[in-house]
Image: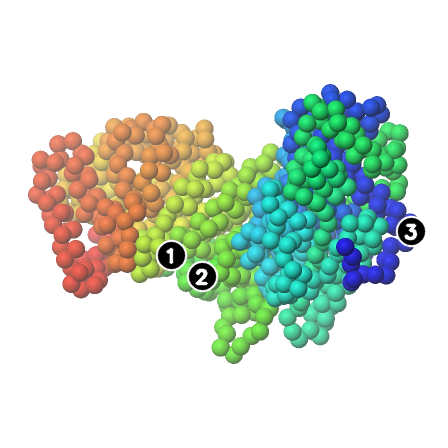
């Protein structure tokens, strides 16, 4: 293989010797991590007991990643760059750990893994070893913002890191297996959202080494002209580096990096001086190297290098097979470790010659420890936006419309700092947040037409019809020290289920690492929710993201169901000031009743749950029944049921409890916001029936409360997969969450009430029948529903 684009030597003889020394040292360390638990510098002949009993790790991608790490060191040092690298190939941990150990970043954070022979032994043994570190690029690895376990998200993370960091270069190594995933395929479009004036640059490096774990990769087998057309169609200028000779590839990669960085500098200069008139075609590098390069060429008579067999552990039987043991020793010695490390095991001067210093090192960049760069948001007083509530339910406001005004102010107040972004899949206006356009348009770098509205080349509202890209952008943005909000339709946020899994795991782990500073929370606003998707129908009706998130590490997640506009404002303020959390906020966009004035909303959110005494009828003797609710529509139906009970059964003592923070239902031993047992019993009682109207799937409430006293008295109504295109009230009737059914539930479950209130129960059943006839005749809900107000 040859590289036609870079024929002239770029490196001097000394520079070539230095980068090759660093690369060989990194390769040696990568192999050592996979195999060795002692004898790290081969001071004695290799014996089976020097080898780990369980061989875990991935060799195949490591030589290419080491090559990139080495050459990034060179250009960072030469150009004094602020740089970050996102390592996409799944289990490339050995390479990134090797690079951070060689530069000293790793030892500064973990002093017991020093840059000497004992430290090297610890580095080797801890890798994929009980009590050690994972095989992928995890939070424990300095310089990382990207969990390398699941594939597909690296490029979106890289662009998220570059947004609003105008001096930052973010290199992203994309594995050719990873490039087959849907999220990564969509993420190539991200360059079309990169503002050359206010953002940094992203330099993708597509690493083609030909194979996944057991199969060839699509892009590596694609004809060159088709691959080139694909990448150019995505808006990139591809530079090709293809060789299997170390000297030639060092020269070629150095030349490609220099050319790419020169192009980036020219593009940014032209844009920032007003010379640029067209969208930028950003450079990228296509790096083609053999899979498992410099490792065993053949094992047991079968080809290994440049095949799928090099993907993980090329020599799997080193302890049992003397031939494998001898081959491993020969492989390790081929890197000439005696030239790379001194008598004490420290990297030689030649190895370290290309390594930058201080925070310029990839493992020490503050961009990868974003909490160090984080600045609090200038949040405006909620009093400036809250609506007055003189009587519960007497006025109507769109909760997300009010939030949009609050976010507009936040956008305006961060215009100079540029440390807040709103992302979403084409739904900002649909979710009633369009007020933000008064402070910032939607970022757009492509052609602008006269018919376009609210597009802005420097905007910080980001819309693209890929939830994966939105999630990845925001994660990269947050992990490098900024703030943001992800607005999405409730049913379709499930598209990022797996991504939020990874982020929650990242946060849980990073919380346990004292050197990682807390970052701003990942905040979801889910609107256009299940109960107001009557026009779009069954496909748009799914409240299950709450269940998904509450399955995860409880100390990292919170789920809020604000019942009205003022409560949503209060929840948003709490979420935007929190750290190291994933906050899920579900709120309606349509005008709904205003229940709480701001001071009461603040107290309610601080508690997470509470009695709405104005809605109940209990006296000092306690309730006969508890009506509980969580979510805006369930709250309205529970209150309507309470109103019906006042009218028809005034002697019944009713307590109304609203839950705004779902995690309060958990025991205090499982979540910091959870209620102590005495608090829970005081609120819900230990022996009275509880009729619970819930926004989502009813069984979640049972799961959260199954240990609680009185659980057998709990009856939950919620969404049970009965949906269609119908009227708003018919949605709750279909799922037995309507006010009439709730009154019937009370009558059925309060001891002795069934006989006394038989006539009332019959009226409720008749009202449901009347509803069914009405909507089929008129196509709208009954006036008693559409015109209902709280009667208190």
Q: Nearer the viewer, residue 536 or 195?
A: 536
Q: Which mark is residue 528?
A: 1
Q: Which mark is residue 450?
A: none
Location of the N terminus by quadrant is bottom right
Report helix, strand or loop for mark 1: loop
Q: CA distance from mark 3 to mark 1?
A: 63 Å
Task: Give the tally of numbered discs.
Answer: 3
Instruction: Return the disc, 1 or 2, that comes first in the chain's sequence.
Output: 2
Please tell me how crowded label 3 is: few (under 14), some (14-19), or many (20+) other residues with Cα within 10 Å: few
Quarter residue 229 falls in = bottom right
Instruction: Return the disc, 3 or 1, that comes first in the chain's sequence.
Output: 3
Using the image, determine if residue 37 lies above or below residue 309. above
Q: Nearer the viewer, residue 58 or 660?
A: 58
Specify whether residue 426 is in view: yes
Pointer 2 residue:
427
Identify the residue at image location x=78%, y=59%.
3
Quarter residue 312 falls in = top right
Using the image, determine if residue 668 lies above or below residue 266. above
Residue 572 x, y percent position in the rendering: 46, 51
782 sits left or right of 102 in the view: left
Q: CA distance from mark 2 to mark 3?
A: 56 Å
Is label 3 in contact with label 1 (beta carbons under 8 Å)? no
Q: Which mark is residue 13?
A: 3
- Name, please, the residue furthest toward the right: 13
- Name, please, the residue furthest toward the bottom: 450
Q: Nearer the viewer, residue 667 or 101?
A: 101
Is label 1 in contact with label 2 (beta carbons under 8 Å)? yes
417 sits left or right of 105 in the view: left
Report helix, strand or loop for mark 3: helix
Residue 226 x, y percent position in the rendering: 63, 63
Residue 132 x, y percent position in the rendering: 65, 29
């Amino acid at each position: 293989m040859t590289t036609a684009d870079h024929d002239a030597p770029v490196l001097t003889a000394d520079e070539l010797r230095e980068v090759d020394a660093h690369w060989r040292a990194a390769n040696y360390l990568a192999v050592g991590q996979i195999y060795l638990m002692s004898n790290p510098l081969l001071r004695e002949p290799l014996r089976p007991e020097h080898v780990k009993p369980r061989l875990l790790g991935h060799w195949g991608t490591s030589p290419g990643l080491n090559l990139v790490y080495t050459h990034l060191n060179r250009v960072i040092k030469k150009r004094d760059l602020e740089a970050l690298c996102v390592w996409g190939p799944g289990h490339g941990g050995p390479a990134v750990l090797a690079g951070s150990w060689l530069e000293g970043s790793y030892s500064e954070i973990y002093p017991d893994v020093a840059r000497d022979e004992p430290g090297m032994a610890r580095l080797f043994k801890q890798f994929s070893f009980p009590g050690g570190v994972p095989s992928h690029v995890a939070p424990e690895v300095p310089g990382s913002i990207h969990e390398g376990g699941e594939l597909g998200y690296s490029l979106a993370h890289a662009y998220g890191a570059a947004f609003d960091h105008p001096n930052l270069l973010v290199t992203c190594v994309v594995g050719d297996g990873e490039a087959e995933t849907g999220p990564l395929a969509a993420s190539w479009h991200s360059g079309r959202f990169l503002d050359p004036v206010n953002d940094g640059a992203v330099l993708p490096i597509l690493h083609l080494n030909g194979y996944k774990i057991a199969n060839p990769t699509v892009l590596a087998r694609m004809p060159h002209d088709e691959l080139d057309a694909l990448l150019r169609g995505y808006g990139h200028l591809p530079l090709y580096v293809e060789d299997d000779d170390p000297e030639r590839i060092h020269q070629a990669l150095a030349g490609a990096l220099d050319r790419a960085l020169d192009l980036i500098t020219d593009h940014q200069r032209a844009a920032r001086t007003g010379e640029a008139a067209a969208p930028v075609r950003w450079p990228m590098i296509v790096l083609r190297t053999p899979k498992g390069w410099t490792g065993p060429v053949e094992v047991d008579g079968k080809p290994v290098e440049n095949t799928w067999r090099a993907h993980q552990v090329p020599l799997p039987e080193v302890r049992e097979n003397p031939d494998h043991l001898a081959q491993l020793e020969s492989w390790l010695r081929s890197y000439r470790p005696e030239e790379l490390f001194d008598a004490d095991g420290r990297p030689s001067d030649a190895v370290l010659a290309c390594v930058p210093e201080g925070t310029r090192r990839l493992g020490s960049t503050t961009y990868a420890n974003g909490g160090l760069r984080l600045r609090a948001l200038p949040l405006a007083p909620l009093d400036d936006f809250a609506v007055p509530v003189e009587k519960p339910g007497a006025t109507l406001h769109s909760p997300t419309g009010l939030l949009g005004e609050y976010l507009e102010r936040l956008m305006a107040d961060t215009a100079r700092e540029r440390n807040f972004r709103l992302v979403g899949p084409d739904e900002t206006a649909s979710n009633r947040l369009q007020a933000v356009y008064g402070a910032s348009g939607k970022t757009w770098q492509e052609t602008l037409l006269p018919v376009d509205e609210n597009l802005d080349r420097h905007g910080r509202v980001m819309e693209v019809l890929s939830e994966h890209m939105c999630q990845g952008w925001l994660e990269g943005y947050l992990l490098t020290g900024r703030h943001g909000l992800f607005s999405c339709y409730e049913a379709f946020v499930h598209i990022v289920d797996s991504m939020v899994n990874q982020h929650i795991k990242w946060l849980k782990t990073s919380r346990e690492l004292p050197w990682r500073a807390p970052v701003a929370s990942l905040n979801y606003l889910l609107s256009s929710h299940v109960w107001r998707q009557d026009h779009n129908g069954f496909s748009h009706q799914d409240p299950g993201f709450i269940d998904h998130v509450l399955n995860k590490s409880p100390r990292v997640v919170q789920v809020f169901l604000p019942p009205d506009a003022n409560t949503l404002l209060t929840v948003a303020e709490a979420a935007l000031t929190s750290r190291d959390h994933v906050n899920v906020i579900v709120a309606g966009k349509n005008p709904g009743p205003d229940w709480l004035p701001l001071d009461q909303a603040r107290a309610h959110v601080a508690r997470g749950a509470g009695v709405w005494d104005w809605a109940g009828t209990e006296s000092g003797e306690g309730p006969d029944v508890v009506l509980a609710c969580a979510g805006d529509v369930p709250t309205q139906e529970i209150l309507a049921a309470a109103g019906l009970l006042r009218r028809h059964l005034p002697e019944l003592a009713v307590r109304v409890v609203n839950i705004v923070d779902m995690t309060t239902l958990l025991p205090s031993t499982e979540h910091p916001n959870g209620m102590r047992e005495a608090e829970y019993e005081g609120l819900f009682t230990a022996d009275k029936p509880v009729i619970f109207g819930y926004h989502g799937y009813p069984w979640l409430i049972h799961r959260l409360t199954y240990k609680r006293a009185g659980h057998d008295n709990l009856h939950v109504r919620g969404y049970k997969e009965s949906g269609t295109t119908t009227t708003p009230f018919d949605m709750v009737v279909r799922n037995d969450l309507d006010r009439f059914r709730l009154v019937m539930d009370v009558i059925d479950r309060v001891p002795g009430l069934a006989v006394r209130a038989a006539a009332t129960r019959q009226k409720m059943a008749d009202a449901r029948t009347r509803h069914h006839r009405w909507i089929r005749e008129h196509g709208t809900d009954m006036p008693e529903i559409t015109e209902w107000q709280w009667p208190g």
